[in-house]
Image (cartoon, helix red, strand yellow):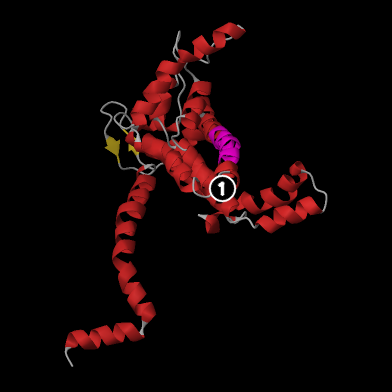
Amino acid sequence: MSLLNRTAGALYRRPRLRLSLLLTAPLLWLAVLYLGSLSVLFVSAFWTTDSFTSEVVKVWSTDNFRELFTVPVYRQVILRSIGVALSVTVLCAVIAFPVAFYTARVAKPRWRPLLVVAILTPLWASYLVKVYAWRLILSQGGLADWVLKPFGLSGPGFGLPATVLTLTLTYLWLPYMILPIHTALEQLPANLLDASADLGARAGRTFRSVVLPMVLPSVAAGSIFTFSLSLGDYITVQIVGGKTQLIGNLVYSNIELNLPMAAALGTVPVVVIVVYLLAMRRTGALSSL
């Protein structure tokens, strides 16, 4: 028997060894590129910068992290970024639920795959094209002003509300919320809804007591995407945010002048997302991904 046949036989009899060998290369790649880059980011956050030459000085110091919590502007930007991510997540959930309910429970079965494709289609469009389109809509004298003018109102203009609306309504992250909810509603047993109606529960009570508890893990799973992607976004706020700044903007502006501070700022979203994942893990969201 050749060496190749003996090796194949040994691997066939040991499925765990076979799985380990298959996963070794991608796990090593992940560890080197992703975890390695995060480690370098965290380490460089403890370095300092020469105030005269702007060169990185590899001297250990916690000054960068101290500034994050003592300088008011950094605290405000961090809290604003988390608030924007939470606002986008809530708005996506509010919009996604009725859309997903229609595609999963109301639409005819033959139309459902086409509706799912329609939900995904905007993701194929360029990120920048969609954001600049909303810049035109929200600009002074734009479509938003034209629609609201008969009611004596005007559009939000550029700023924080425009950033939240653009991140939510341009289909940047909304499909990531719709799809998990759609899948959960599609798998929801119809007999539970029928039983609730037979017991006299109205639509609102059925939603609160039957539908929402079973779909909540999927909502939490979708929120992981919308929250993390919104927290790290910096292009949208540059285009429609006016003078508003988020964490991504501060990281970008400090890369050339103060790399260690940019690294310290970059660790904030990582820590926030890890905390958010731990919180969502309690809802069963990770098993719904």
Q: Is residue 175 magenta?
A: no
Name the residue rendered at 48%, 42% in the picture: 115
What element does badge 1 sit on? Answer: helix
Side (left or right) of 267 relative to 209: left
Give the camera-side residue of 2 and 65. Answer: 2
Q: Residue 19: image x %, image y %? A: 36, 74
Q: Please rate how many residues cluster around mark 1, counting C-alpha atoms within 10 Å: few if below 14, some from 14 to 19, many from 20.
A: many
- Above or below: residue 68 compared with residue 278: above
Left or right of 266: which side holds 50?
left
Q: Residue under label 1, please give it.
A: 104
* Amino acid beneath label 1: Ala
Residue at image location 55% in from the left, 32% down from the top: 79
Q: Please indicate, yes or no, whether residue 89 appears anywhere in the rendered image.
A: yes
Quadrant of residue 125 in the image? top left
Residue 229: name its quadrant: top left
**Image coords of residue 71 (percent x, y):** 50, 28
Number of numbered discs visible in the structure rendering: 1
On the question of residue 228 being in view, the answer is no
The quarter of the picture where the N terminus appears is bottom left
Relative side of 241 to 93, left or right: left
> Among all residues in the image, which is located at the extreme bottom?
1
Residue 284: percent from left, percent from top: 59, 56
The secondary structure that dominates the magenta segment is helix
Q: Give me the residue at 66% from left, 55% from top.
A: 190
Q: Residue 24, how many percent across, how many down?
A: 31, 68
Which one is in front, 91 or 17? 91
Residue at the right extreme?
200
| Residue 125 located left or right of residue 222 | left
Task: Verify whether residue 91 appears in magenta.
Answer: yes
Nearer-the-camera pick, 49 or 229: 229
Q: Which residues are magenta?
A: 86-99
